[in-house]
Amino acid sequence: MATTMNKAQSNTGTENRHFDLVSVLYHSLEGGAVYEQYIQDAKEAGDQDLTNFFQDVKDTNCRLADRAQELLKARLNQG
């Protein structure tokens, strides 16, 4: 995995830590969109336990995305 990240850095000029943070941000946002469909599927099936579970998962991903965004902003502003 380190080889992949080193390659990403050499190809893009982006530091590994920034690349990693952008990746977490992307996947958290993507997950939020996917989980919305899972929530709808559970609602349509009348499964409140699963609806609540998927909503919790989506909320967690949204919080992680917000945190990743703030961390990325702070690091990019450092120069």
Image (cartoon, rainbow, N blue to C red):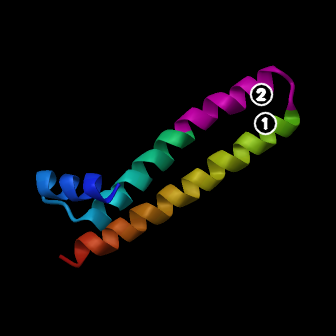
Percent across and percent down for residue 27 are 45, 46
Percent across and percent down for residue 6 are 22, 59
Give, as a single range, the part of the protein colored magenta.
33-47
Percent across and percent down for residue 55 are 71, 43
Q: In the visual, does 6 lie left or right of 20?
A: left
Mark number displayed over residue 27: none
> Mark 1 and mark 2 in contact (Cβ < 8 Å)?
yes
Label 1 is placed on what type of residue? Thr
32 or 20, which lies in front?
A: 20
Magenta span: chief secondary structure: helix
Residue 45 within the segment the image draws in magenta:
yes
Q: In the visual, does 54 lie left or right of 64?
A: right
Label 2 is placed on what type of residue? Ala
Q: Is residue 21 above or below residue 11?
A: below
Residue depicted at 35% across the width and 59% down the height: 20
Residue at the farthest top position: 44
Q: In the visual, does 45 lie left or right of 27?
A: right
Mark number displayed over residue 42: 2
Query: Would you name the residue on which mark 1 appears?
Result: 51
